[in-house]
Amino acid sequence: MEITTAEQAKEIIKKWVEENHHKLNEIKDENSNFHFEIDYPLGSQKRQRILQPKEYPGLIVLLNGVAVAKEHTEKLKEMNENDKDAFYGEIRNTLLFQQNSYEMNIDDTGVAKAIQFSYEFYFDGLTKTKLFEGLLLNHRSLLYIVSKFNDEFGLPTMPKDESANA
């Protein structure tokens, strides 16, 4: 079946996500034709978003992200600029050729506060395989960032209600 409308995309994505037993919440979003939040990986506390922005007809966007742990931001503040640039450069060089994209939110002092991942495709590429491939790529990128920060700065103390801090 060819997908040509946001309503068709919404219904087929909802069906596939529910077939795979993910919890799906619809998010009210005036800028999107549809906006879902799902547990991914299945049954975890981690969340990803699936949305179709009104501004870009035919585009599907998959999003997830991670906030940098307070202990890690403190250690980033203490790093000299060359070491910080090298650390960020290694992340950039690793993620540069991935099929998904990333955006690192860096404050005025050069300290990363959060990293968001996105995977985009259009209705003509909408398949169940493509959808779940994008979710997996975003999840793997998140795991890479968490591992990279933990390897560099040690394991942070995790509040009980947070599931994915770097």
Image (cartoon, rainbow, N blue to C red):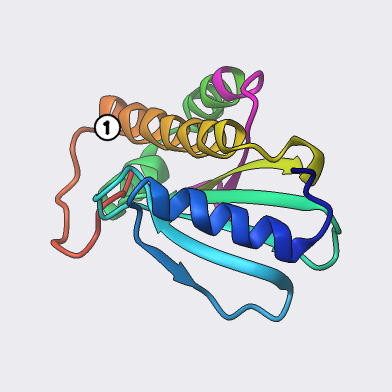
Kind of residue at disc 1: Asn
Q: Is 7 in front, or is 153?
A: 7
User: Residue 113 lies in magenta, yes or no?
Assistant: yes
Which stretch appears magenta? 94-114
Number of numbered discs: 1
- Residue hosting label 1: 150
Q: Is 59 in front, or is 156?
A: 59
Q: Can residue 67 be spotted in the picture?
A: no
Residue 151 falls in which quadrant of the image? top left
- Residue 50 in the image: state x and y as whole percent: 57, 56
Q: Secondary structure at mark 1?
A: helix
- Tell me: residue 30, above or below residue 141: below
Q: Can residue 159 be spotted in the picture?
A: yes
Residue at x 31% of width, y 51% of height: 69
Residue at x 36% of width, y 27% of height: 148
Residue at x 13% of width, y 62% of height: 160
Residue at x 66% of width, y 50% of height: 61
Crowd class of label 1 (few under 14; some 14 to 19; many from 20; radius 10 Å): some
- Residue 31 in the image: state x and y as whole percent: 74, 74
User: Residue 103 lies in magenta, yes or no?
Assistant: yes
Quadrant (top left/top right/bottom left/bottom right) for the C terminus: top left
Residue 89 falls in which quadrant of the image? top right
- Tell me: residue 64, above or below residue 134: below
- Residue 161 in the image: state x and y as whole percent: 19, 65
- Tell me: residue 79, above or below residue 9: above
